[in-house]
Amino acid sequence: MYCIVDVETTGGINGPSRLTEIAIFRHDGQQVVDSFHSLLNPGCPIPPFIRHLTGISDEMVADAPVFADVAADVLRITQDAVFVAHNVSFDFNFIKKELNWLGYDYFRRTLCTVRTSRKLIPGHASYSLGKLCQALEIPLNGRHRAQGDAAATVLLFEMLLQHDKNGLIPRVK
């Protein structure tokens, strides 16, 4: 199993930054078999730059659950799965940080679709999600929103699976 993940946050990985949105698609190597999505109340103001980038406002998350309320869902849907994301270290380490604050140790195998794309579909000028999706004609609706970016990453991941003739992507059940 694989879990394709995207998060939106109040800032960078270091320091007190918090999650504002999470989307996870559980994938069996053929298709999406489960999904989870939620806005999250970060418990702090969303900086103007982030608000402008994502469109997520303080008002939108005012009545959203805090991460502690969805932690069990995140643990459940990612259990026994490879954690897949575009620039995986950001998404994985952010979720790991939030879970560590709640007392959980969080370990998952990871796969980065940026690095994997560079190996399996070389020659692109940019491997940013937006530019890569445009070049590969992958629809990307809701850019800089967790569900839209994660859904596009699912399609990119499926394309990478098709191009992976040498077993670069771990095959899991």
Image (cartoon, rainbow, N blue to C red):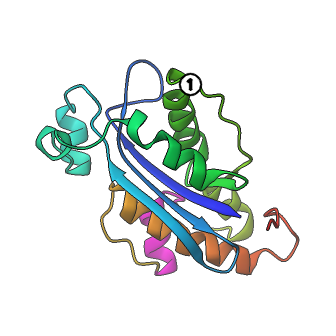
Q: Secondary structure of the magenta portion, mostly?
A: helix
Q: What count of labels does the image hold?
A: 1
**What is the quadrant of the C terminus in the image?**
bottom right
Asked whether 131 falls inside the magenta stretch, the response is: yes
Q: Position of residue 2 (x, y in %)?
A: 67, 62
**Residue 125 in view of the camera:** no
Stretch in magenta: 125-137
Q: Position of residue 65 (x, y in %)?
A: 30, 41
**Residue 67 in the figure: left or right of residue 105:** left
Please say if 90 is above or below 124.
above
Q: Position of residue 154 (x, y in %)?
A: 54, 70
Please say if 104 is above or below 137.
above
Image point (31%, 33%), residue name: 10
Image point (33%, 35%), residue name: 66
Please say if 82 is above or below 47.
below
**Residue 106 in the figure: left or right of residue 156:** right
Q: Kindly state the secondary structure of the residue where label 1 is placed.
A: helix
Can you tell which quarter of the image residue 49 is in? top left
Seen from the viewer's position, the closer of residues 67 and 115 is: 67
Bin the neighbour count of mark 1 within 10 Å (Cα to Cα): few under 14, some 14-19, many 20 and up.
few
**What is the quadrant of the N terminus in the image?**
bottom right
Q: Amino acid at mark 1?
A: Asn
Image point (43%, 43%), residue name: 70
Furthest toward the left, the residue is 59
Name the residue carrying label 1. Answer: 100
Please say if 31 is above or below 50.
below
Seen from the viewer's position, the closer of residues 97 and 159 is: 97
Seen from the viewer's position, the closer of residues 99 and 155 is: 99
**Residue 170 in view of the camera:** yes
